[in-house]
Structures are given as C-alpha cells and as structure tokens.
Amino acid sequence: MSTNDTQHTGPSEERLSDTRRLHRFDVGAEPRLVAQLGLADVEIDATGPGGHVVVDLETFGSKARDLLERTSVEQDGSTVRIDMPRVSTFFGLSPRMRVRVQVPAGTAVDLGAGSGDVSVRGELGGAHVETGSGGIDLESVHEAEIKAGSGDVRVGRAHGLRIRTGSGGIRIGEVVGDVAATAGSGDMTVGTVRASTSLTCGSGNIDVEDVSGDAQVKTGSGRVRVARATQGQLSVATGSGTIRVGVAEGTAAHLDVSTVSGRVRSELESVPGAGENDRTLMLRARAVSGNIDLVRAV
C-alpha cells in the first residue's frame, strides 16, 4: 500500500484490479476504524500522518471478485467502517480478504474477524479486537480488550489490558495500568506490570519478569515463575507444577506458603520486621503437586 499520498481533498476510491480496491478518507482529530470481517488477514499501520485513513482491500480464491464488490467501506465523520459480507465455507474454497489500513497514530479500533491474523504497527488509542481463530499482534495501545477463540496474542505496550483466549499463548511486554488475562490452554509470558494484575491459565506455564503491584497468578496445570516481585500483595497458585518467586533486594516479604506434595525452599533471610525504608511484599503461594522456591531476585 502506498503511503506517499498525504494531500487528500475528500473520499476517493481507486480500483487497482478486479480483486483489489483502494479507498482514501480525510478524518478529524479523533479517528476511529470499525471493521466486521469474515475470512480476512488484517494489517494496520498506525504510524501514518494525522487527518488521513487509507484502506487497501484485496481478495483471493473462489469468487474473489464478488467478495470485493459486496464489501462496503464507508465514512461517518471521523469513523471509517469496513463491512465484509458472510460467505459460505465449502471445502476450503471460500474467498478470503487481505485488509491493509493506514491510520493516524492514536486511532481507536473496533475489529471483529471470523478467521485470520490481525497485526498492528504503531500506537492505537484504544482497541477492541475479537477473532474466532487467528493470531493477534498489537505493538502499542492505550487501552485494549482482546478476545480470541484460538490463536496466540501478543501486546507490546499498553496502559490497560484485558485478554481472553480459548487456546493459544499470551505474550505481554509492558503494562502501566491494570491487566487481566485469561487463557483456557496456552503459556503466558509477561514482562513488566505496575498495577493490579490477574493472570489465569487452565493449563499452561506462566512467566512474569517484573511485578510491583497487587497480582494474582494462577494455573491449573503448569509452572509459575515470577522473576522479580517488588511490593504489594502477590498470590501465586498451581494445581500441578512448580512455583518460583524472586523477591527484590530491599523488599521485606511476609510469607504464607504451602504445598501438599512437594517441598518449600526459601533463600530469604528471616528478620524481625521491615525497616523504615523497606518495601513490603505480602506473598501467598499454594501448590497441590510441586515444589515452591523463594529466592532473592538477581
């Protein structure tokens, strides 16, 4: 998709081929993209200049031309809406679409797709993304709610985040605000979280690099590792698997730890009480079958 055209005078449509169409729109200060799609892969570039949205639609497979003709792209104020019709699935011959959109940084996105991958480069103001199957990859977003039936989800940076997947891994880089992530099956990998955090897996490992607010981390079956916990209330639990928590230097930890069949090993020194300048961590850890290790974070 060409990004060179920045001087627009109004909505325009350009037919590049029987199966590819380009739309350009001028939008105001609070742009919004709404898309309801079926079988489609979506690429959003949120690094574009302010004031313009470019939509590039390309269809493939059986009846690709018909699918393009029946897909509408409309504008209402600063909102651009893409509506793809439902198509019947017949032995994998159904047409599918590639949707490439250039939007200004900070655009809000509301997107639903039956099947296909969604990727976003740049920063969104807010996002609601829901897919039946397919991966979701957001580089940066202010607030996001993500639901995936099956497929991996990755979010690089966010101020607030809610994720729910049926099956598939979840990878989160850094979140400044609250986080709630739930996976039926699949591993979770989380970088830095600074506020209220809830991470839950039916089955899968959970790895957290750095947590400094209240957090609940729980998996039915799998390993739980918190590399560095600084302060707040941390609750960690697994039905079947090991637990390892690293407590930051300068943090006094109050421990409530037990395992039914396993051992508890602590490298933390026992002291009478927290010093005036010490941060405090209230740590509760429970394992049914597995060992629990408590160490000083490196």
Image (tube, rainbow, N blue to C red):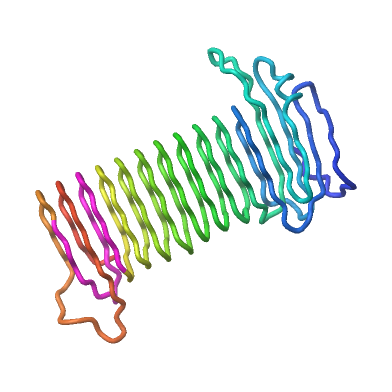
Instruction: Name the residue: 31% across, 77% down.
Output: 279
Q: Quadrant of residue 101?
A: top right
232 vs 39: above or below: below
- Residue 237 falls within the magenta-colored stretch: yes
Residue 102 placement (x, y as % from top left)? 71, 45
Q: Nearer the viewer, residue 174 or 144?
A: 144
In the image, 253: left or right of 258? Answer: right
In the image, 117: left or right of 278? Answer: right
95 vs 209: above or below: above
Q: Nearer the viewer, residue 84 or 101?
A: 84
Q: Residue furthest bottom?
A: 276
Q: Quadrant of residue 82?
A: top right
In the image, 17: left or right of 179? Answer: right
Instruction: Name the residue: 18% across, 52% down.
Output: 287
Q: Which segment is the magenta one?
A: 233-258
Q: Nearer the viewer, residue 116 or 263?
A: 116
Quadrant in which the C terminus appears: bottom left
Residue 46 placement (x, y as % from top left)? 67, 50
Q: Main secondary structure of the magenta part?
A: strand
Instruction: Name the residue: 76% across, 54% down.
Output: 49
Q: Residue furthest right?
A: 9
Residue 81 placement (x, y as % from top left)? 71, 40
